[in-house]
Amino acid sequence: MSTFSSISEAQTSFGFRGGASVSSVSYRYQLGRPIQFSDGVTAQTYAFVLEHFGQKNAGLQLEFQYITLGFNQENDQLAVNRTEFDYLKVPLLSNFYFGRSGRFHIKLGPHIGYLLDARDVSREFDVELTELPTYGQPGDDPKRLMYGLSIGAGVSKLFGKSTLALDGRFAYEFGDQESQDRIFDLNITTLEFTLTYLFQIREAKWQK
């Protein structure tokens, strides 16, 4: 009963988040070799957001997010290979905020995701041992599951039942896309810069 009571007394909002994501890639083509870095991909990202505060300054945020990750790799002749990965990503974040109508917030927690599409946007040169392989060709078979951690901070402003929030977020992926041992490991990190609109659909007990 106490669980249902706390849910009924909580503040719940629903909305939309959109902005830009910038991914970065590092990898090692063999065990013991130095880490190599490759330029990432800048793309738009969108998410449906459900925000739930069971306490006045602490709650949870669940998102269903569309995001594109990837890499650009350039050889000595300035030819470019570009690969992109489209994901449905689901972050579940602890949400802490400070302030009243103008607020500062911190969000952190795990995320999982599923690969919707992998494509080689540009293939201008054949890869060598030290370079990243293809992931959008027949037979590449990239791994479908993503999982990692996200942390972010930002500011928000209340307008009656509406909230506008500006966020910066960092995400680290523990899994990688390689399924055929063509390289030893592959790591992707992401920076996101987004604007969120939320509309309150349930008023909290402490607001009454």
Image (cartoon, rainbow, N blue to C red):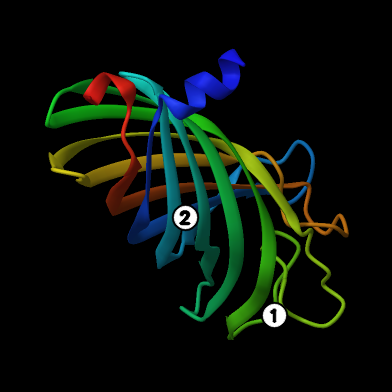
Q: Is residue 69 left or right of residue 196?
A: right
**Residue 203: x and y, percent?**
31, 34
**Residue 89: x and y, percent?**
58, 54
Residue matched to label 1: 126
Q: Residues within 10 Å of mark 2 (few under 14, many from 20)?
A: many
**Residue 121: x and y, percent?**
57, 82
Q: Is residue 120 left or right of residue 100?
A: right
Quarter of the figure with residue 116: bottom right
**Residue 43: x and y, percent?**
41, 67
Q: Residues within 10 Å of mark 1 (few under 14, many from 20)?
A: few
Q: Amino acid at mark 2?
A: Ser
The answer for how far apart the CA atoms under marks 1 and 2 are is: 23 Å
Q: Is residue 101 left or right of residue 181?
A: left
Against 54, is 145 above or below? below
Residue matched to label 2: 23
Front of the two marks 1 and 2: 2
Residue at 59% across, 72% down: 83
- Of residues 88 and 133, which is closer to you in this image? 88
Q: Amino acid at mark 1?
A: Asp
- The C terminus lies in which quarter of the figure? top left
Disc 1, SS:
loop
Against 202, is 4 above or below? above
